[in-house]
Image (spheres, rainbow, N blue to C red):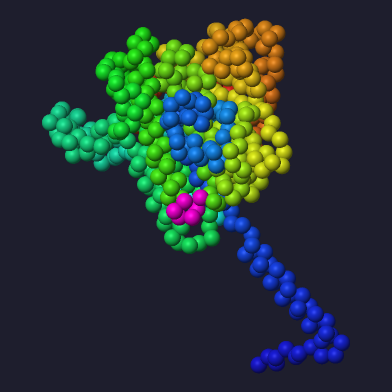
Amino acid sequence: MNAPNPRPTGLWAPLVAVCACLALAVASCVRESAAAAPRRPNVLLISVDTLRADHLSSYGYERATSPRLDELAEGGVRFERAYSSSSWTLPAHMTLLTGLPVSGHGVCDDRLFTRQAPSGGALPVERRGHFLSELLARQGYRTAGFYTWKYLEPQFGFGPGFEVYERLGHTFYSYEPVWAEFQSLQEAGDRDGMRALADRYPRLFDPTTPSSEEVVDAGIAWIESVSAEGGEQPFFAFLHLFDVHDPYTPPPPFDSMFDPDYAGDIDGTRVTSKDSPVRADMSPEDLAHLIALYDGEIAWVDSQLGRLFARLDELGLSDNTIVAVVSDHGEEFFEHGAKTHRNNLHVETVHVPWILRWPAGLAANLEVGVCVGLEDVAPTLHGLCGLGQMPGAAGADLSPALRGEEPFADREIWSELLHFERPGAPRRELSLRHADRSFLRGARGTDDRRIEAYDLARDLGEAAPEVFTVDDDRARNFRLSLDAFRTRLDAVRSRLPLVWLGAESALDSADLAELAAMGYTGLGDDPHEAGSAHQGRLCIDGCVWDD
């Protein structure tokens, strides 16, 4: 049996006593410091699909479309000039969650997921970057994502880092048991059976069914469950709301809110169908009603966000929750000859809202007028959480400027698009916005090497371009900026892990049918024209831009 340790005696006794007192004092200070240290903020990131900034009241719109978002902006920060990395959902959301432009993460077109190897089978797709959800989870955050459209599904690379990642607002294409039964009935030519199936699942077969309420309910329920556990872990919740996207069919009373006396035939449906009444030559009254229905969708989604914000208040979470509301892209109403989106990179499709509120950490009623990009959202949230620079991101961490520690710097913001508007080589689009200037560069192969330049101080809608060729002296600054953009992204990509999305990500018949039903046609027409996913190549070189 070991003898007990003897008590200190002689000269050592006073010294040991002093050390013991010091140790107790240090331990007490550590405990008090830990207790006083503020808990890291919760993060609630909301993406409202297809929401153009200039249709929000807080961005100067004449209609009261967004009272709850306006209140959010008054209590926080509104970025006046935020631009998306593209004009459609898939690449823009990849940018939102990774802090990388399209040429950084490499997911530039859904045709990448339809390519086949010469020997048969799907070709893998490469993706680069870290998701914000992954990084926050590693720092002890609880994480959940609720989304409502196919392009955010795991087969396109989304979902890493989320404990819960769930699609809501299903259609009969995406709800596997019903799709399998529908296919069997369709192959058998059983029309009565298909009608009976639709009667059993009316919400799945009705493309006008709203989904925002379902997403907000799921988000609230998850936040409540995490809060009820009473732990010290902060949460990161990502909500994606799709109702502003066409068809523009808001539920009552939002369907008649902004054009109650209209008596025509436009009802917000069949916007992209072959027999669509939504055409460039439609009457001004019909177009005005279409826009009124779009605005009604915004007001409907705003009302649902109001429920979410109110519940945060009731739970006592608002003060230390960073709420960020953004959009992936805007919407066209023939300002430049087209409808919906994914047609060009003009301001109506890439100018998006970005509103931030964090009562415990940010000033209220702050308007930021410099150019920022969707690629800045994730790095800024990462920085606001006290985690420093987001690994691998190309976007800027704006948290020091938001805290008043440094001035905001106006940056060059790039947007990219690969557009298959007709068979053959795609049209490649690139836009640059900086200060009060914007440049749009488009080409199909080596054709049409022109640049459109706009003075945004006088022409905010980009209606009156100055046109010159890419070789013109007036394009010199654009060429220098493009070279610098390539160099910067090449360096970023070289430091990022490469993730291969394999055969399980390939689009099947149900995927293609669902995309086609929403107007995303042409998939697979010429999948080899979708550009490359070649290791080491920038998307801007091999997919979206010509050398």
Dominant secondary structure, magenta: loop
Q: Residue at x 54, y 51 (%)?
A: 319
Say if residue 424 shows up in the picture. Answer: no
What residue is drawn where x is 67% and y is 7%? Answer: 472
Q: Is residue 447 left or right of residue 337?
A: right
Choose top left, top right, bottom left or bottom right for residue 517.
top left
Indicate left or right for 500 with 369 as reference: left
- Residue 87 place in picture, x, y as percent: 49, 24
- The residue sitting at 62% across, 32% down in the picture is 368
- Residue 315 part of the magenta segment: yes
Q: Is residue 187 visible?
A: yes
Say which quarter of the image contains residue 526.
Answer: top left
**In the image, is 110 to the left or to the right of 457?**
left
Magenta-highlighted residues: 313-318
The quarter in which the N terminus is drawn is bottom right
Is 257 on the left or on the right of 546, as rendered?
Answer: left
